[in-house]
Amino acid sequence: MGIAERIYEQVKALPEPLAREVLDFVAFLRERGDRAQWRDLMAAQAASLAPQWDNAEDEVWNNA
């Protein structure tokens, strides 16, 4: 039996309010993972765009 099936069997035995808490926790875990991926993507983009943002031609915008 895989982990998903084991979790399912455990959750089936819970009362409805506790099963909803488990579902909320699963949503939290998925969202946390999505945020980590988004943060990694933003960091990669920032590093690759840094030369575009920091150049002499755009110095006028730094004083705006």
Image (cartoon, grey):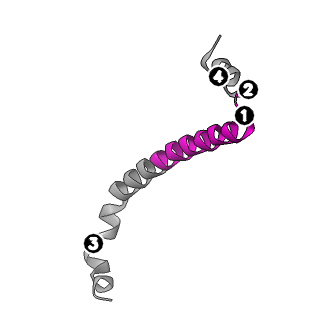
Name the residue carrying label 2: 12
Pinpoint residue 30: horizontal percent, then vertical percent. Answer: 57, 41
Q: Nearer the viewer, mark 3 or mark 1?
A: 1
Q: Residue beneath label 1, please?
A: 15
Identify which residue is drawn at 37% across, 53% down: 43
Query: From the viewer's perspective, is 4 left or right of 60?
Result: right
Q: Is residue 1 left or right of residue 59?
A: right
Point out the stretch of residues depicted in magenta. 12-37
In primary-sequence order, the first of circles 3 and 1 is 1
Where is residue 44 shown, x and y percent of the image? 38, 50
Please, what is the three-letter code of the amino acid marked with disc 2?
Lys
Q: Which mark is residue 50?
A: none
Check disc 4 and report the residue beneath it: 4
For label 1, the SS is loop
**Residue type, mark 1 in image:** Pro
Which amino acid, by three-letter code, is at mark 3? Asn
- Is residue 16 on the magenta stretch? yes
C-alpha separation, residue under disc 4 versus residue under disc 3: 52 Å
Question: Alpha carbon of mark 1 to alpha carbon of mark 2: how far?
Answer: 8 Å
Q: What residue sits right under mark 3 in the picture? A: 55
